Image (cartoon, rainbow, N blue to C red):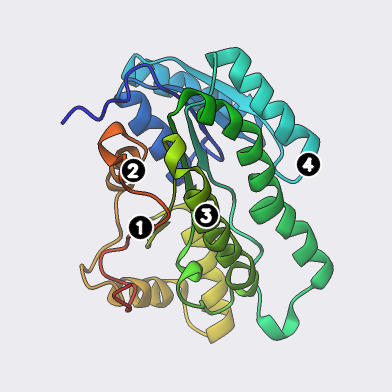
Amino acid sequence: MDLGLKGRRALVLAASKGLGFAVAHALAGEGAAVAVSSSHAGRCGQAAERIARETGATAVGIAADLFEPAEVERLAARTREALGGIDILVVNHAGPALGLAAEIDVDALARQFRMVVANPIRLIRAVLPGMRARRWGRILTLGGVSMIQALPNKAMDNTLRPAMVGFTKALANEVARDGVTVNVLIPGTFYTERVQSSTEANARLFGMTVEEAMRERIANIPMGRFGTLEEFGALAAFLVSERAAYLTGSVWRTDGGAIRSIV
């Protein structure tokens, strides 16, 4: 199936590794030009070089710190300069700090709010006028299971991530007639550095070995395995494609059946 992404221009955040890299690679594989962003110039440059080499697509690395409003605004401007415009925005970021709800650091929560909610919205506002003017745009936020159900030892995730669900639905309704879709994609458990670190933290919290904690995570997945990065990238590419033009304002998930609710 041709996803209709040839010639489209995408900015993917936190894309030097993990799920963000998988999405950027999948989009480039479909013929889109991609800007690979992360907080580390060297890593995003290397990731862009790899994507360009493996797909033949245009890929550039543009560093930005998602905690800093001014850098987020410069990121949008630099991406437009490099690619000629932004048709697709994939919002992604590192996971918020781990911890229990009863012990949450309110000052740290305010800082994490900038990364998870305020600055992604700032970036969306920066790219939206161009999308609406062209009558075509895709905004996809990569979320977390905590958008649907509270997770142990992830109080900041549980507090902040659901805010982006509400924003997504509100924005989707406002821009649907302009040809712009706005969706959320929730990954289940894919083996990434974040999964490793959170499993280690859970092992310490619950008094078990890391191996036991990892086996427990897998046991809770009906498919009995973690997802692959290629599987995640493929679904993300579809959701921002021409073929998904009638899908908006929704939360999608790729989790091997791990989330217990139907909706």
Image depth: mark 2 or mark 3 in front: 3
Do the CB atoms of the residues marked 2 and 4 lie less than 8 Å apart? no
Q: In the rendered view, tell whether residue 140 sits above or below residue 165.
A: above
* Residue name at image x 46 percent, y 35 percent: 178
Amino acid type, label 2: Leu
Task: Tell me the distance, in whole angstroms, between the alpha carbons under discs 1 and 4.
Answer: 29 Å
| Of callouts 3 and 1, the N-terminal one | 3
Task: Tell me the distance, in whole angstroms, between the alpha carbons under discs 3 and 4.
Answer: 22 Å
The local crowd at label 4, few if under 14, some if 14 to 19, many if 20 or more residues have their Cα within 10 Å, is few
Image depth: mark 1 or mark 4 in front: 1
34 or 42: nearer the eye?
A: 34
Task: Tell me the distance, in whole angstroms, between the alpha carbons under discs 2 and 4.
Answer: 28 Å
Q: Which residue is mark 2?
A: 239
Task: Tell me the distance, in whole angstroms, between the alpha carbons under discs 2 and 3.
Answer: 14 Å
| Of callouts 2 and 3, the N-terminal one | 3
Helix, strand or loop for disc 1? strand
Q: In the rendered view, tell whether residue 223 sits above or below residue 10.
A: below
Task: Tell me the distance, in whole angstroms, between the alpha carbons under discs 3 and 1.
Answer: 12 Å
Q: Which residue is mark 4?
A: 68
Residue 95: assigned label: none
* Residue name at image x 52 percent, y 31 percent: 132
Q: Position of residue 99 (x, y in %)?
A: 66, 74
Image depth: mark 3 or mark 1 in front: 3
Q: Which residue is mark 1?
A: 252
* Residue name at image x 53 percent, y 79 percent: 152
Amino acid type, label 4: Glu
Q: Position of residue 246 (x, y in %)?
A: 30, 45
The local crowd at label 2, few if under 14, some if 14 to 19, many if 20 or more residues have their Cα within 10 Å, is many
Image depth: mark 2 or mark 4 in front: 2
Q: Position of residue 223 (x, y in %)?
A: 20, 67
